[in-house]
């Protein structure tokens, strides 16, 4: 599996194994060490280093990290780093915050070692849990598609391997992995999924549930990639820019398949600095296409406001060469729009055949 992953990645010269000391990542380190001892993969030279991230979230975490580093050095990996991080306690949830801190540490270690690839020990069981959590959140295709085998420098060669098999690798290599107590802590949704939900599904539906969920992720990744490609090209062909804001023609948006229309609206929000909108917020923005006259704003996360400008209002706007308007966009019903037409941003009148959705970043409040 690792050999195939490295071949598909173009045979990176230096690998960085991310290892917590647990069975999955320790098994991956042992397999990577085999290639480190040989010095090549399919005749392509390779060296292998490692990094252990200490999240400082548990008592004795420094000792666990130090022990994992010693084992990695004994396997022959070099260099081996320990990166200590501070996990944010506000904002995102604890799991997301820990993941963000960990990935920042991995990127820093890769840069320090000149690594071309970062190996992660996620297994088929992790993938199945990811799909179930995405379903429980009511997320879209991209979330349910789970983790990618490769994304940038990140490689996950063990996504087809069961967790029990990584434990067998550790036993065969006479390695004593550390077992993270949070993996069975019911306070975390992922832990409950691992300890309670998946075993229950296997019991009631029969064996093979985890494999089916992982297979679903693989299929959806292909679908998500295709939809993303179509949405990106569609957005590029439709977007019109006017300073910090952008517009999309409503007739063209209405003609799109819903799966593409919602993605194009999300891309417009991201383009002006917003965050990924929830499905409910996307519905609210898309509903502007069915309004009469000018409408909005609909607020999207990240400080983005979406308005509908009607065709009648657009035709009454002064042309670019006849005004020095301040580009303000109305935020009230159409009844007030005419009186403020001279204060809005100039809009090209050429080619206007329909109304538009306007995406505008909002200035943060003055301190």
Image (tube, helix red, strand yellow):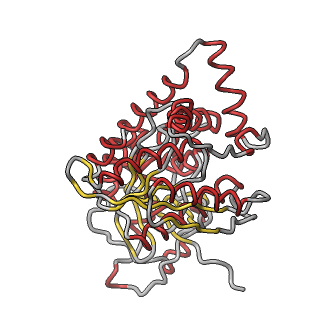
Whether residue 5 is visible, yes or no, is yes
Q: Residue at x 35, y 53 (%)?
A: 37
Q: In terms of depth relative to the viewer, which is nearer, 361 or 125?
A: 125
Q: Is residue 152 above or below residue 161?
A: below
**Residue pictured at 31% horizontal, 46% vertical:** 230
Near-viewer residue (95 or 138): 95
The mark tally for this picture is 0
| Coordinates of residue 229 in the picture (x, y in percent) | 31, 48
- Tell me which residue sits at (46%, 53%) in the image: 265
Residue at x-position 34% and y-position 53%? 232
Q: Quadrant of the C terminus?
A: bottom right
Viewer-side residue, 139 vs 208 = 208
Residue sitting nearer the eye, 312 or 19: 19
Outermost residue to the left: 43
Give the percent coordinates (x, y) of residue 337.
55, 68
Q: Is residue 247 left or right of residue 3?
A: right
Q: For residue 311, say whether it is visible.
A: no
Instruction: Tell me the quarter of the image containing the N terminus.
Output: top left
Q: Is residue 91 left or right of residue 272?
A: right
């Amino acid at each position: 599996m690792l050999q195939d992953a490295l071949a598909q990645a173009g045979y990176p010269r230096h690998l960085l194994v991310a290892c917590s000391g647990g069975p999955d990542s320790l098994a991956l380190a042992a397999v990577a060490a085999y290639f480190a001892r040989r010095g090549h993969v399919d005749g392509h030279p390779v060296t292998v280093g490692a990094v252990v991230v200490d999240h400082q979230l548990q008592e004795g975490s420094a000792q666990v990290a130090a022990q994992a580093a010693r084992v990695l050095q004994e396997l022959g990996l070099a260099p081996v780093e320990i990166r200590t991080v501070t996990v944010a306690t506000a904002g995102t949830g604890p799991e997301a915050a820990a993941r963000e801190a960990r990935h920042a540490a991995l990127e820093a270690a890769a840069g320090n070692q000149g690594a071309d690839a970062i190996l992660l020990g996620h297994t088929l069981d992790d993938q199945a849990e990811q799909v179930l959590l995405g379903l429980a959140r009511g997320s879209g295709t991209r979330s349910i598609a789970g983790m990618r085998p490769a994304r940038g420098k990140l490689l996950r060669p063990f996504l087809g391997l069961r967790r029990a098999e990584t434990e067998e690798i550790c036993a065969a290599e006479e390695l004593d992995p550390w077992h993270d107590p949070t993996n069975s802590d019911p306070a975390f949704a992922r832990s409950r999924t691992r300890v309670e939900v998946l075993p229950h599904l296997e019991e009631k539906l029969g064996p093979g549930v985890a494999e089916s969920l992982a297979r679903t992720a693989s299929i959806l990744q292909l679908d998500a990639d295709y939809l993303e490609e179509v949405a990106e090209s569609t957005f590029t062909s439709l977007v019109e820019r006017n300073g910090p804001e952008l517009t999309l023609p409503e007739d063209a948006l209405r003609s799109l398949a819903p799966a593409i229309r919602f993605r194009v609206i999300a891309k417009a929000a991201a383009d002006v600095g917003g965050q990924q909108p929830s499905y409910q917020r996307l519905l609210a923005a898309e509903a502007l296409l069915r309004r009469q006259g000018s409408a909005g704003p609909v607020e999207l996360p990240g400080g983005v406001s979406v308005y509908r400008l009607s065709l009648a209002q657009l035709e009454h706007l002064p042309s670019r060469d006849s005004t020095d308007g301040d580009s303000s966009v109305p935020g009230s019903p159409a009844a007030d729009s005419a009186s403020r037409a001279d204060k809005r941003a100039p809009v090209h009148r050429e080619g206007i055949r329909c109304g538009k959705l306007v995406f505008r970043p909002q200035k943060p409040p003055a301190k």
